Each structure stands twice: as C-alpha cells, then as structure tokens.
Image (spheres, helix red, strand yellow):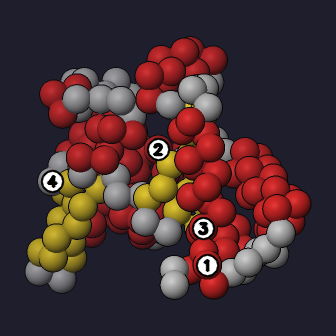
C-alpha cells in the first residue's frame, strides 16, 4: 500500500487543500519548504507532498505558462522556462533574493572558485545565511578547503538564471565590479 492509499480524503476536501497549497505557492513568489507549507495550510506533511505532486501534474497538463518546481524539500510556483524572457522584461528586480543576497551571489559568480572566508570578509557575517540559502537552492556547491569551504557555481545556477557558463565571467556580469570595489 502506498502513501496515497493510506490517506483517504473526500474529493471536496482534497480540492480545498489543493486550493490552499496553490494560493500559498502563488502568493509566496519564492521557494517554500514543507514546514512553511504545513504552517500555512494546516495540511499533514505526508498528504501535503502527495497533493503538491497532484498540483504539479495539473499545471504540467494545463499547457499554460505556469509550473510548479521542486528542489528537494522546496517548492515554488513559477513561469515556465520558455517564458522567462517575457517576465524578465516586466520584473525590475527579484523578490526572491534581497539586494544583499544578489551581491553575495554575484561575487561568487565573478570570483569562483572563492573561499567562503573571503566572501564573509567582503560581505560580512550575513553572507553565511546567503550561502546557506544558495546551497539549499543548489545554485552553488561547496567543498572543504582547510578550515573553510571553496564555493563555486553549480549547474542549477545556469538553469535558474537562463544562462550559459560562458555568460558568467570577468567583465560579463556588469555590476559585480562595482560591488567588489565597495569597502
């Protein structure tokens, strides 16, 4: 017996739960983990994961521009990859990353591979939180290097920002030089 067979709910209750999950993902505009979704929707974590899969399948079959993306224990409602160029023209900034997070990620992209200790010297102690978030989202990878970690971009970074590896490098990311030169 699979998890879905263990948890029986009536059709109307399932529809209501799906609407709650959909509303939470839509309004958040960022990655949400299981704990956050449980707190927002009051849905059992096992049932929640089953229902998110159903919701994802629904959006995949709709033939629309919206999709639900999963990265480990994180979910996000987003625009399908082929429409990012349109939304990029409309969006003036990223609600998903603060300016400070963007600056930290830009330095990693520009200087990779770079030691975490160097990032912290440049960006301050908040960089630890930024790096943790980027690792969770699989945008960067870290390998042990002495007492610190060496950070570099992961393949998911390029997919996430619709870039090619050759698009990221010295002189390619315009504002990074300004960020690096700030005291």
Q: CA distance from mark 2 to mark 3?
A: 33 Å
Left or right of residue 145, residue 98 in this image? right
Nearer to us in this view, 175 or 85:
85
Q: Residues within 10 Å of mark 2 (few under 14, many from 20)?
A: some
Nearer to us in this view, 171 or 86:
86
Q: CA distance from mark 3 to mark 1?
A: 11 Å
Q: Residue furthest left?
A: 146
Q: Which label sits on residue 113?
A: 4
Q: Mark 1 — residue?
A: 5
Tell me where residue 153 appears, x and y as whole percent: 24, 50
Q: Mark 2 — residue?
A: 102
- Above or below 87: residue 14: below
Q: Earlier in the sequence, mark 3 or mark 1?
A: 1
Picture quadrant where residue 171 is located: top left
Left or right of residue 119, residue 87 in this image? right
Q: Earlier in the sequence, mark 2 or mark 1?
A: 1
Q: Residues within 10 Å of mark 1 (few under 14, many from 20)?
A: few
Nearer to us in this view, 46 or 120:
46
Q: Residues within 10 Å of mark 4 (few under 14, many from 20)?
A: some
Left or right of residue 41, residue 181 in this image? left
Tell me where residue 102 appears, x and y as whole percent: 47, 44
**Residue found at x 74% / y 50%:** 22
**Residue found at x 30% / y 29%:** 163
- Above or below 81: residue 18: below
Q: Mark 3 — residue?
A: 50
Mark 1 and mark 4 in contact? Answer it, CB < 8 Å: no
**Residue found at x 18% / y 49%:** 112
Tell me where residue 111 appears, x and y as whole percent: 20, 45
**Residue found at x 50% / y 21%:** 83
Q: Earlier in the sequence, mark 1 or mark 4?
A: 1
Q: CA distance from mark 4 to mark 2?
A: 17 Å
């Amino acid at each position: 017996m699979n998890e879905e067979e263990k948890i029986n709910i009536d059709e109307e209750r399932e529809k209501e739960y799906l609407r709650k999950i959909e509303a939470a993902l839509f309004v958040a505009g960022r990655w949400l983990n299981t704990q956050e979704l449980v707190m927002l929707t009051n849905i059992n974590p096992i049932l929640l994961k089953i229902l998110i899969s159903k919701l994802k399948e629904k959006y995949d079959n709709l033939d629309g521009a919206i999709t639900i993306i999963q990265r480990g224990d994180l979910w996000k409602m987003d625009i399908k990859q082929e429409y990012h160029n349109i939304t990029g023209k409309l969006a003036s900034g990223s609600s998903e990353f603060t300016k400070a997070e963007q600056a930290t990620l830009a330095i990693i992209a520009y200087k990779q591979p770079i030691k975490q200790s160097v990032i912290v010297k440049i960006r301050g102690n908040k960089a630890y939180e930024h790096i943790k978030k980027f690792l969770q989202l699989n945008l960067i990878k870290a390998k042990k290097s002495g007492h610190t970690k060496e950070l570099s971009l992961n393949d998911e970074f390029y997919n996430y920002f619709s870039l090619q590896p050759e698009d990221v490098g010295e002189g390619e990311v315009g504002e990074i030089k300004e960020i690096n030169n700030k005291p």
